[in-house]
Image (cartoon, grey):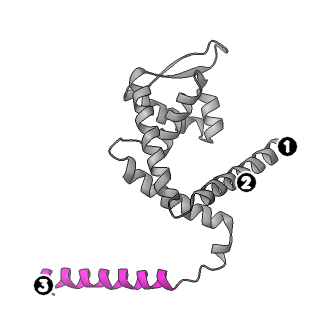
Amino acid sequence: MPKASKRLATSRSARVANSEEKNLKETLDLTALQRTPGFMIRILQIQIFEEFFNYFSEAGFSPAEHSVLITIRDNPFVTQSEVAGALRIQLPNLVKILLKLETKGFIRRKRSTRDKRAVELVLTARGEQAAVQAAKMADDFNRLTLSPLGEKEQKQFLLMLSRLVHARTNEQNQRP
């Protein structure tokens, strides 16, 4: 078979496979999974993160970088360990995020005045400006994310999520 014909056949096979995969996805019965909070929250998280990356691409923030930046803004002199614990980020992964934020000139690290073994995180002037921009963008993004819900439903939804997180946090803290 000539190369051009072989390429065309391969391309056609790939299109047929993609079409069959798309049809299979459309026909999968996910009813049972859609009744489980874990599955639905995970799917929503994936959708929101994909939209977040697109929305924040111009500003150059990932969801994790945004969360760390805002946490540092809202908690002056917070330590690396405190941020890692609060955001449930493993310390080695947080160190990579902090290095990116430090390289961009948004944060600086310094020895803690409370505990000489700890490292505190502080926003620079440039970091404060970035946090203002990130917070404004986040407000707009959150409005878009919640827009399918009415104002009352938005408040109820966030309250319910907070209650679920709080209940599980308390359960984890009470375990021996």
The residues colored magenta run 1-27
Mark 2 or mark 3, which has the lower sequence index?
3
**Residue at image coords 54%, 83%:** 28
Nearer to us in this view, 146 or 21: 146
Q: Which residue is mark 3?
A: 2
Report x, y in % for residue 174. Answer: 85, 43
- Check disc 3 and give the amino acid type: Pro
Marks 1/2 in contact by CB < 8 Å: the verdict is no
Disc 3/disc 1 C-alpha distance (Å) = 69 Å
**Residue at image coords 61%, 35%:** 84
Tag 3 secondary structure: loop
Main SS type for the magenta part? helix
Q: Which residue is mark 1?
A: 174
Residue 3 horizontal side relative to residue 144, left or right: left
Residue 35, quarter of the rendered image: bottom right
Report x, y in % for residue 160. Answer: 70, 55
